[in-house]
Image (cartoon, rainbow, N blue to C red):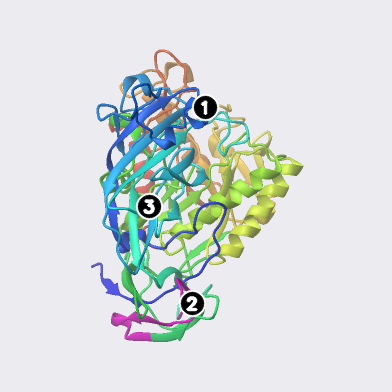
Amino acid sequence: MKKVLTVSLLVLSSFAVKAQYASLLANVHGRKLQSLNGKWQVIIDPFNGGAGNGKAVWKDQKPTGKYDFYEYGFVPSKTLQVPGDWNHQKPELTYYEGTIWYKKTFVHKPQKNKRAFLYFSAVNYKCDVYLNNQYLGSHEGGFTPFQFEITGKLKDTNSVIVRVNNRRKPENIPAMNFDWWNYGGITRDVSLIETPVNYIKDYNVQLAKNSVDTIAGWLAVGGNNLSEPVLINIPQLHLNYHTTTANDGKAFFKIAAKPHLWSPADPQLYDVIISSPTDTVHEMIGFRTIQVKGTEILLNGKPVFLKGVNIHEEIPQEKRRAYSEADAEMLLKWAKDLGCNFVRLTHYPHNEYMVRLADKWGIMLWEEVPLWQNIQFGNPEILNKADTMLKEMITRDKNRCSIIMWSLSNETSPSVDRNKTLTAMAGYVRSLDSTRLVTSAINHVRYDKNTITIDDSLCKVLDVVGVNEYLGWYVPWPAKPEDMVWENPYNKPLIMSEFGAEAKYGQHGSAETNGFWAEERQAQVFKDQISMFKNIPFLRGTCPWVLADFRSETRLQPVYQQGWNRKGLLSDKGQKKQAWYVMHDYYRHISNSY
């Protein structure tokens, strides 16, 4: 039976402002917040004409004199729901890539002795943010949170205007072409957060690396007083730890403790209460270790096989981006029903509801940033952008025990610039979080008759190697599946991070021919893959591509695809294809113990 324990933690932090927006508050859901979700007024601006001084939509001007007029206007009849992508909300926006201006008016009486922050869980892709017609700052990246401190800028009635642009560009991450729908808009929650003047800003609370009896980490405070007493209290561990932050607002700690370890079989969480003289934050944290030893992945010191699946952040039945806790429950329940103890969150950081629910349900996670295929690695700005995305992802999710791996990229082509960039990113990840594993999904292998050799020098800087291979679909079998041999010159654990084939639900035909798009053929590809897996001694996990059919503008087959990638084990309506039963049976016969 699951137990939920309680930890009280007091944290205060002073971090440098990065770029034009403030560093992130930890655990926004544990704060006093006002939701700004709901209907936002919008202006569609396909040629981005409203950004210049000629129109300056952000000024939100209205005529006052007899000869005044403005060639734009926010009107109550033109709205979009936030959070939510614009593509599914209006038919004329299905394929839209460009600018849309959003406006939200809200009432909030400014509080004395309080700080205020405007927090966006995600906006795709670039945005500029204005409060009461004053520029706050900008953000780039469609899947990570950002915030602005707005202390002293609030009135009784306020307006937020956001210019959002999702147009693809070669210098973006991801770049021009990617195999999922380019959902634009304010796609996740927007919140107004209040804290005391001196407040708990950030914290990192985990088991020390390779330890099961030491809780270690740091606390950080923000505000006018950066040196303050702080408390870490874990009632059910009878733990009360007092410390004081230094003049930079930070305190490091190591505490002897023996928490019950989190695992898929027993996903125990501790209620963490973080307190200072003026602020308190509650948090739910689980404790576990994750390590690599040779070709083994060790969870809590014991070998584990990752029974996984890839998931896109999409609700296929409604042709929209997933954004709510209910959406997360549906997607992760599908994974649990398949028999998974592991999920690869492809190809970008998913909504925070997903990772918090995985903590509760005991699902291990691979989380990655969207460096997908054709990235401009020769552009020096790419590393800066990628590091920002990594930092925002890790800052948000560093206390989530379900996340066991940070991933750098997916299917990027080896080159001098690419290897240099991803190697630097691997080092940066470890500087932010040394307790988790670093991985990447590669697709460069060498075929020689019935032998497949992992052939990508990036593997040297990875803890776990992910390989995407589509034998039986994009690549013919060079020999019988059961005769295939894999060679691993890097002596590291292998996860088959993608494999599969396309089939349209209800389409039946030959199990030997790809062109019929038949369920039987998809199921046979999975059977063949499983036959091959049995001969890979260093295989430590499998992630079929993909949980459910998902939308993709690049999938052009007019009869069977119609704008959908049909590699799902489930259809776009959630119906089980034959391949689902093949993987379910395979996972059922792999021990749940670790």
**Type of amino acid at the residue the image marks with label 3:** Glu
The one of 224 and 577 positioned closer to us in this rendering: 224
Residue 348 in the figure: left or right of residue 452: left
User: Is residue 341 something one can see in this rendering?
Assistant: no
Q: Callout 2: helix, strand or loop?
A: loop
Q: Position of residue 24 (x, y in %)?
A: 46, 59
The one of 109 and 500 positioned closer to us in this rendering: 109
Q: Position of residue 568 (x, y in %)?
A: 39, 32
User: From the image, which quarter does the N terminus lie in?
Assistant: bottom left
Task: Compare marks 1 and 3 and give the one earlier in the sequence.
Answer: 3
Q: Which residue is mark 3?
A: 352
Q: Position of residue 328 (x, y in %)?
A: 31, 46
Q: Callout 3: helix, strand or loop?
A: helix
Q: Badges 2 and 3: C-beta atoms under 8 Å apart?
A: no
Q: Position of residue 594 (x, y in %)?
A: 42, 63
Q: Callout 1: helix, strand or loop?
A: loop
How crowded is the residue under tag 3: few (<14 C-alpha within 10 Å), some, or many (20+)? many
The stretch in magenta equals 214-240
565, above or below 112, in the image: above
**Type of amino acid at the residue the image marks with label 2:** Leu
Residue drawn at the location 40% of the way across and 85% of the way down: 241
**Distance from label 1 to label 3 (Cα)?**
34 Å
**Type of amino acid at the residue the image marks with label 1:** Trp
Q: Which residue is mark 2?
A: 226
**Distance from label 1 to label 2 (Cα)?**
59 Å
Mark 1 or 3: in front is 3
Q: Which residue is mark 1?
A: 473
